[in-house]
């Protein structure tokens, strides 16, 4: 009788281990199935992103082609654009200095550049037209 009890405990312990093993196997299979579903979803998302990017790229190429065929803007617009970019290039060193942490913000204590004549490079303006007099 005394020897039967340890053998019974051994069998119980063995069955408990088998049950835990079966539970873990089920959990692992469930987790594997979830991962497969996630991978399929990710694959669909990647394919959709590639398709979307390809479509956007084609649209950009079409827009570029249309823009190449357009006429250049009016010379006054080109002159303004040129002056704008020259101004930007002039201010880059001050901003670069600030952004690198080596100087103050460019708008703190701004140095006033010398004023230019207002209509420099533009044709002289015509005087305003006289207002029509009321008819009697």
Image (cartoon, grey):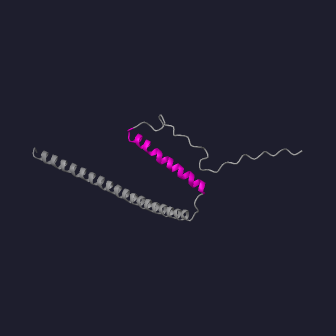
* Magenta segment, prevailing SS (helix, strand or loop): helix
* x 40%, y 41%: residue: 97
Count every numbered label the image shows and give the total: 0
Quadrant in which the C terminus is drawn: top right
* x 16%, y 46%: residue: 9
Quadrant in which the N terminus is drawn: top left
* x 53%, y 62%: residue: 63
Q: Is residue 39 above or below residue 108?
A: below
Q: Is residue 80 magenta?
A: yes
Q: Give whichever of 16, 91 is nearer the camera.
A: 91
Q: Is residue 56 above or below residue 93?
A: below
Q: Is residue 90 above or below residue 57?
A: above
Q: Which residue is most to the right? A: 136
* x 51%, y 37%: residue: 112
Residue 92: x and y, percent? 45, 45
Residue 46: x and y, percent? 41, 59
Instruction: Please state if 110 lies on the left or on the right of 22 as rendered.
Output: right
Q: Which residues are magenta?
A: 74-102
Instruction: Please state if 22 lies on the left or on the right of 80 as rendered.
Output: left
- The picture quadrant where one finds residue 76 is bottom right
Q: Is residue 43 magenta?
A: no
Q: Give whichever of 54, 133 is nearer the camera.
A: 133
Instruction: Please state if 10 lies on the left or on the right of 74 as rendered.
Output: left
Residue 51: x and y, percent? 45, 62
Q: Which residue is most to the top? A: 109
Q: Give whichever of 38, 44 is nearer the camera.
A: 44
């Amino acid at each position: 009788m005394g020897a039967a009890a340890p053998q019974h405990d051994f069998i119980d312990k063995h069955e408990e281990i088998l049950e835990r093993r079966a539970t873990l196997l089920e959990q692992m299979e469930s987790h594997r199935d979830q991962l497969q579903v996630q991978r399929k979803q990710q694959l669909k998302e990647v394919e959709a992103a590639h398709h979307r990017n390809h479509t956007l790229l084609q649209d950009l190429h079409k827009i570029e082609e249309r823009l190449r065929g357009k006429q250049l803007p009016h010379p006054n617009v080109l002159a303004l654009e040129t002056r704008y970019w020259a101004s930007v290039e002039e201010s880059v060193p001050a901003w670069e200095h600030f952004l690198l942490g080596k100087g103050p913000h460019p708008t703190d204590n701004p140095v006033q550049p010398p004023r230019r004549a207002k209509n420099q490079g533009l044709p002289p303006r015509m005087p305003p037209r006289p207002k029509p007099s009321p008819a009697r």
